[in-house]
Image (cartoon, rainbow, N blue to C red):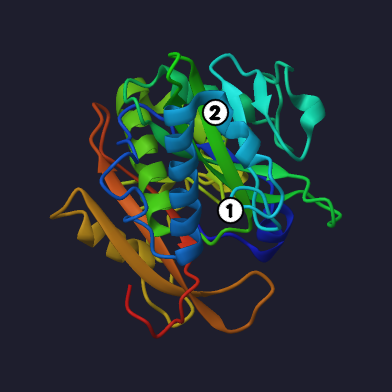
Amino acid sequence: MVLRACFRAFRIGLAGLLFTAPGIRSFAAADPAAPYLYEETRQLVRVVEAAAARVEAEGEAAFAEFARPGSRWFNEQRYFFIYDATGVCVFHPVAPHLVGLDLGELRDFYGKPVIRRITELAARPEPAAADWIFYLWEEGTQFFPMWKSSYVRRATTPEGRVLLVGSGVYNLRVEREFVRRQVDAAAELLAAEGRAAAFAAFNDLSSRFVFLNTYIFVLDDAGRALVDPAFPTMEGRSLRGFRDFVGHLVVEEMIEKLRSADEAWVQYKWPLPGGRTPSRKVAYIRKVRLPDGDVIVGSDFFMASPIWMRM
């Protein structure tokens, strides 16, 4: 469950995925930005929602404003990309040569089908369906691909054409909501398709389940590792005695919390990769009841807020 520094260093920025698993609730709410803690996340959600609203009102006539340098839509911080339901790029102010091309097979560093994830939104029943894509992309000034987090919203033009409107940011801070939704999707996949199919997906670097420098782990109800992408050759070992930086029994707390609940948050202290002092790490866990025994599905991440601040 706990990543070694070398694993973290190698994996940083090396995965991406879209949260569009069945059963995940749509972000289209009274305020789609409300679930998020960080202002940069909320700003991205709100500007994409505003752009989608313009597409719904004006259709492709809105593209001219989206392409105006220095505007709210196109500046040093952001630009918009727009695809149709088949994966054809219909708008891209930074790479206009892509317009008109079918990019459905475009993949990130780990082989994740980025555009295919975008077009999955077109099949969702909600008119304003929206989700996140996390993927490795070339930033242009770095030697290695970097995490890019894109929020994408479905919009239907006045002519009835379904378009997918999105914008992304490099190195967006991990939100608790991102992790919660991903673990929920993993739990649903496990309950629907069983251990073999779900475990294969959780271990697949090109799947949606390796994301934002973390991944999905699975334990049995005795604390033995069933899925642990950081230590794939050590699956089956007991983690019940795992202690954090200050000696807290982390997995023991997980097991105890899930005795009386189906989901829980667990906080513990662990150094950042390459670091020596403890940082705050948080795990979201779910109990999944299977015919062959209950399991614990979860994911953990380092919080950006200070270690002394409450969750």
Q: Which amino acid does label 2 sit on?
A: Ile
Give the mark nearer the N terminus: 1 vs 2: 1
Residue 233 can be seen in this image: yes
Distance from Cα at disc 1 to Cα at disc 2: 23 Å
In the rendered image, which quarter is residue 6 located in?
bottom right
Task: Using the image as rendered, state which of residue 123 and residue 240 is in the foreground.
Answer: 123
Please tell me whether mark 2 sits on a helix, a strand or a loop.
Answer: helix
Q: Which residue is drawn at 49% across and 49% down?
A: 47
Number of residues whose C-alpha sits closer than 10 Å to that of mark 1, classed few (under 14), some (14–19) or many (20 or more): some
The quadrant of the image that shows the C terminus is bottom left
| Tag 1–tag 2 contact (CB < 8 Å) | no
Q: Where is residue 20 in the image (x, y as percent from the top left)?
A: 43, 31
User: Please, is residue 294 above or below residue 269 in the view?
Assistant: above
Q: What residue type is labelled 1?
A: Arg
Task: Using the image as rendered, state which of residue 233 and residue 45 is in the foreground.
Answer: 45
Q: Residue at x 37, y 76 (%)?
A: 248
Report the residue marked by disc 2: 118
Q: Which residue is drawn at 77% across and 48% down?
A: 145
User: Please, is residue 235 above or below residue 291 in the view?
Assistant: below
Report the residue marked by disc 1: 72
Q: Which residue is drawn at 30% across and 36% down?
A: 25
Please tell me whether mark 1 sits on a helix, a strand or a loop.
Answer: loop
Q: Where is residue 52 in the image (x, y as percent from the top left)?
A: 46, 36
In the rendered image, which quarter is residue 246 located in?
bottom left
Image disc number at residue 10: none
